[in-house]
Image: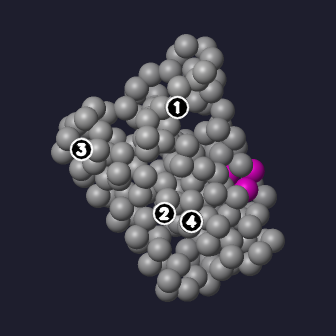
Amino acid sequence: MVGAVSLLFINAIAGVGALFYTVYILCIATDLADGPIARKTNTASSMGALLDSIADVMVIIVALIVFIPILDFYFWMLALVGLVIGIRSIALIIGFAKYRTVTLLHTYANKGSGLCLALFPVWFGLFGLQAGFIFMAAGAVLAAIEELLITIRSKQLDRNITWLFGTPKVI
């Protein structure tokens, strides 16, 4: 969360440059590492899972705030972002109505969606804006739909559910 707020200040002071990308990469790296570290050290908690999800959302919002004004997005791209935000908002509203708490989930699709977002600058550089955006948006749409379906069908809240059909059993 501190990293996400720092990105806003860095962007306001220095713009999108080496310092911005360094902090951005640190945000992504710590997000990828915190869950496995918490599980390995037996310090995982529902509060930690919730804070991790909030931090993920904050980084995504900051990325949107920073990149939408500087890239020449097409209307269909902004409409797709709106679709994802809409689906996620519906899932949050349903989850809050059912469980009286924020219900952001730690599914594989959500982690993959975050990775797709993190890789957007790379895909943008390699394939251009439209193709890079399609790669990123595909993951976000699928993850949002999955989270909505999980929230609708779940009888109890499990933020650590890994995918739509439950937690796979290890054989």
The reply to whether dot 3 and dot 2 touch (C-beta < 8 Å) is: no
Q: Position of residue 110 (x, y in %)?
A: 52, 48
Q: CA distance from mark 2 to mark 1?
A: 22 Å
User: Which mark lies nearer to you, 1 or 4?
Assistant: 1
Residue at image x 65%, y 45%? Answer: 28
Q: Amino acid at mark 2?
A: Val
Residue at image x 40%, y 50%? Answer: 147
Q: Amino acid at mark 1?
A: Pro
Q: Amino acid at mark 3?
A: Phe
Q: Can you see residue 51?
A: no
Q: Residues within 10 Å of mark 2 (few under 14, many from 20)?
A: many
Say which residue label 1 marks.
168
Callout 1 secondary element? loop
Q: Residue placed farthest to the top in the image?
A: 42
**Left or right: where does residue 48 sit relative to residue 112?**
left
Residue at image x 56%, y 67%? Answer: 137
Q: Amino acid at mark 4?
A: Ala
Say which residue label 2 marks.
141
Residue range in magenta is 20-24
Q: Residues within 10 Å of mark 3 (few under 14, many from 20)?
A: some
Q: Residues within 10 Å of mark 4 (few under 14, many from 20)?
A: some
User: Which mark lies nearer to you, 2 or 1?
Assistant: 1
Q: CA distance from mark 4 to mark 2?
A: 5 Å
User: Which mark lies nearer to you, 3 or 1?
Assistant: 1
